[in-house]
Image (tube, rainbow, N blue to C red):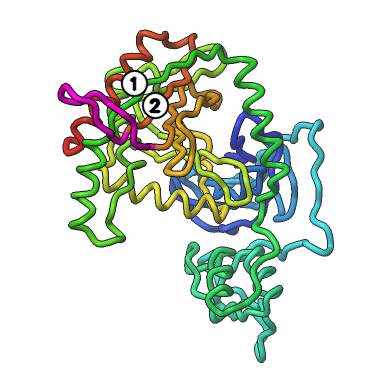
Amino acid sequence: MSIFTMPSLGADMESGKLAEWLVGPGDRLARGDIVAVVETQKGAIEIEIFESGEVVELIAAPGQTLPVGAPLARIRKPGEVEDETPEAAPEPEPAAPVTPPTPESAPSAPRPPSHGASGAPPGARAPGRVPSGALASPAAKARAAEVGLDLSDVPGSGPGGAVLLADVEAHAKASGKPAAKGKPGLDMAEMRRAIAAAMSRAKREIPHYYLSHRIDLQAAQDWLAATNAERSPDRRLLMGALLIRATVRALAKVPELNGRFEGGDYAPSDTINCGMAVAMRGGGLIAPAIMDAREKSLDDIMAAMRDLVARTRTGRLRNSEITQGTVTISSLGENGVDALFGVIYPPQVALVGFGSPRPAPVVHDGSVAARVCVTATLAADHRVSDGRRGATFLAEIDRLLQEPDTL
């Protein structure tokens, strides 16, 4: 028997609020399944489980705020026989208080297991009530009741067809219902505090060094324009996808920039999980990772970018995307300034920045011409690399962008 606990979703996280369960007792789980939603300063994060098994008991109730490491559920591993005296759950650390849900916001009990129907009373259904045999998360029920939706009319995208909060929001928007007063977890003041805590730690603990290099993007710009001219709008590429692809490929030449420095030791990563800084509409930044970015083609990276931006701005990211990044890219896009010098997000050891591409005078083929250029910068950890290696890395990004058809 194992205990599933409140995960750490960043070095600055001390506690999280369990927003909803997506599983119930008796449900069978496979590695990578989404089992719960936890609200933090970064938003509502979908929590994956990294072991297979069966849910025996849900220890924590939706609405509770719990410290990192607090028990959430008991999981029986494959092949295990239930013990008559179940393993005691570890006690949460006393320093962080547990806040029970208030009467006004207390959600209903977790949903029943997917292999058994929930017996709803017969007759007319009040808004937010789940019909017999249907499943819905507590947050979905509460939101449906708030806007007057009948959950039997809402298609579910969760396990076993369960209706999730995102399903209710989408259906409410399509039906002209009032928008939610605020997306769960997207408290901008809290987000600012979380960003400040992480960046203060980074500048205090990481010996940064910085490099910058101007890159002639005209060849990449011309190739991009020609490629997009032959594509439908939904398949067109953005310059950002080329910048990410070139950066990921350049890490093969300077692999020490891809990894994590934890517990006083550096661990290089064989996988490139490339964080992508996404600006929130209300302010603040989140940098979820494009997982296994080295294995993705240019089109795959473009699709992953669209997906991550959409889910970040609706507060629906997965914990692996928040916690398993190995390097981060921050790009100002078309409306920024010439250059940015970032702060490394711990425990990573490098951050690559791109300013706004814009025309600049460049000596090309022996004469001065106006060509599209971008300033690339590198913030790197001096415990792991040095300026010579950092310069090699930026030069390799430059070389790759001169041959966009090879990306």
Q: Residue 195, position in %: x, y?
A: 64, 34
Front-most of residues 269 and 108: 269
Q: Residue at 53% across / 14% down in the picture?
A: 208
Is residue 110 left or right of 306 when viewed as pictured? Answer: right
Q: Can you say which quadrant of the picture contains the C terminus?
A: top left
Q: Is residue 272 above or below residue 51?
A: above
Residue 368 covered by magenta stretch: yes
Label 2 sits on residue: 376
Q: Is residue 79 visible?
A: no
Q: Residue 278, position in %: x, y?
A: 50, 43
Q: Is residue 388 above or below residue 39?
A: above
User: Which quadrant of the view contains residue 88?
Assistant: top right
Mark positioned earlier in the residue sequence (2 or 1): 2
| Within-10-Å neighbours for mark 2: few <14, some 14–19, many 20+ | many
Q: Are marks 2 and 1 in contact (CB under 8 Å)?
A: yes
Give the prevailing secondary structure in the magenta stretch: strand
Amino acid carrying label 1: it is Leu
Label 1 sits on residue: 394
Q: Residue at 69% across / 43% down in the picture?
A: 16
Q: Residue at 61% across / 56% down in the picture?
A: 21
Front-most of residues 209 and 108: 209
Label 1 secondary element: helix
Front-most of residues 404 and 185: 404
| Within-10-Å neighbours for mark 1: few <14, some 14–19, many 20+ | many
Q: Residue 304, position in %: x, y?
A: 37, 48
Q: Residue at 63% across / 28% down in the picture?
A: 198
